Image (spheres, rainbow, N blue to C red):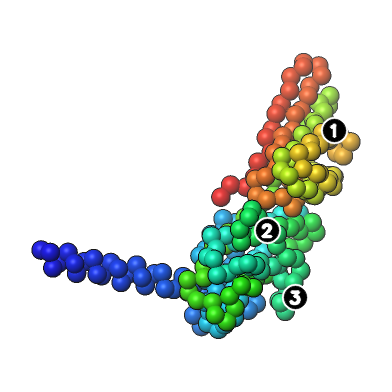
Amino acid sequence: MRKNAWLVLGLGLVLVSGRGARADFWDIQTQHDGSSATENELVHGSDQLHDLGGPPLPDQDWFALGQKPFSSYEAVADATSGDIGPTMALDRVDAGGAVLQASQAVGIGYTRSLRWANLTGSEVNTEFIRVMSAGCTTNCGPEDVYRIRFAETTYSVPRFNNSGTQVTVLLLQNPTNYAVTGVVYFWNPAGAAVGNFPFSMVGKQTIVLNTSTVAPGTAGALTIAHDARYGDLSGKTVALEPSTGFSFDSPMLPRLH
């Protein structure tokens, strides 16, 4: 009985060590993730574990992504092992590897956040996320791991109404300690654009916007693209009906995972 127990324990240790020894299967596939030819795509809610141990070395992990018009996004690399530091490069790049945007540090460790918005009216499908280490390069191993997460950060508000006697006010708060820029987009019930409001907010600032100055005489919904972290902003619209004194609140919501 004791011999069988040790056999089971030994097999379990082999399986556990096998999983730990190879965190990044994307590196060793025929269609690997070391260039813009990667087939590994990040979508809203993606959460993957990778290492920077190659092959080849120094290792680069590339991720394809699609960007919708008038939308915003965040990629986060965290759960890093110590040898990856003191700097990990989490960048948005073009197909040739030219850096379009570098990430920012989050907190006091090696975690990086990359945030941006596609404010054009077209999809962007020619950019990539690339992760490299400036700490371990040719001596990185399978234990030099990180986790990458990806989210669409666009907010939505399901209702504004500036038709008839109603007027809608947007309350938009930046409760963080960093500055945020973005654009509020106004859409009629058929999904056609009827106005937009660019904004810039310092930390702790609140904007109170009378939306009838942007989209008068119409109703619909709002979306908000920005460069804040996922879920960091808060807000709502309040539609006032002067004839009755009633008000209608609509919360500003992030896209759920």
Q: Provide the residue designation for mark 1.
A: 210
Residue 251 in percent (x, y) is at 67, 35
| Label 3 vs label 1, nearer the camera | 3
Compare marks 2 and 1 and give the one earlier in the sequence.
Answer: 2
Q: Provide the residue designation for mark 2.
A: 105
Residue 44 in percent (x, y) is at 60, 56
Residue drawn 56% across the image and 55% down it: 45
Task: Name the kind of residue labelled 3 in the image.
Answer: Ala
Name, please, the residue furthest toward the top: 244
Residue 6 in percent (x, y) is at 19, 67
| Nearer to me, 115 or 139 | 139
Structural distance between the alpha carbons of marks 2 and 1: 35 Å
Locate the N terminus by quadrant.
bottom left
- Residue 200 to residue 167: above or below: below
Q: Confirm whether residue 32 shows in the render.
A: no
SS at mark 1 in the image: strand
Q: Confirm whether residue 214 shows in the render.
A: yes
Task: Name the kind of residue labelled 1 in the image.
Answer: Asn
Whether label 3 touches label 2, CB < 8 Å: no
Task: Name the kind of residue labelled 2 in the image.
Answer: Ala
Structural distance between the alpha carbons of marks 3 and 2: 20 Å
| Label 3 vs label 2, nearer the camera | 2
| Nearer to me, 185 or 18 | 18
Q: Provide the residue designation for mark 3.
A: 98
- Residue 252 to residue 119: above or below: above
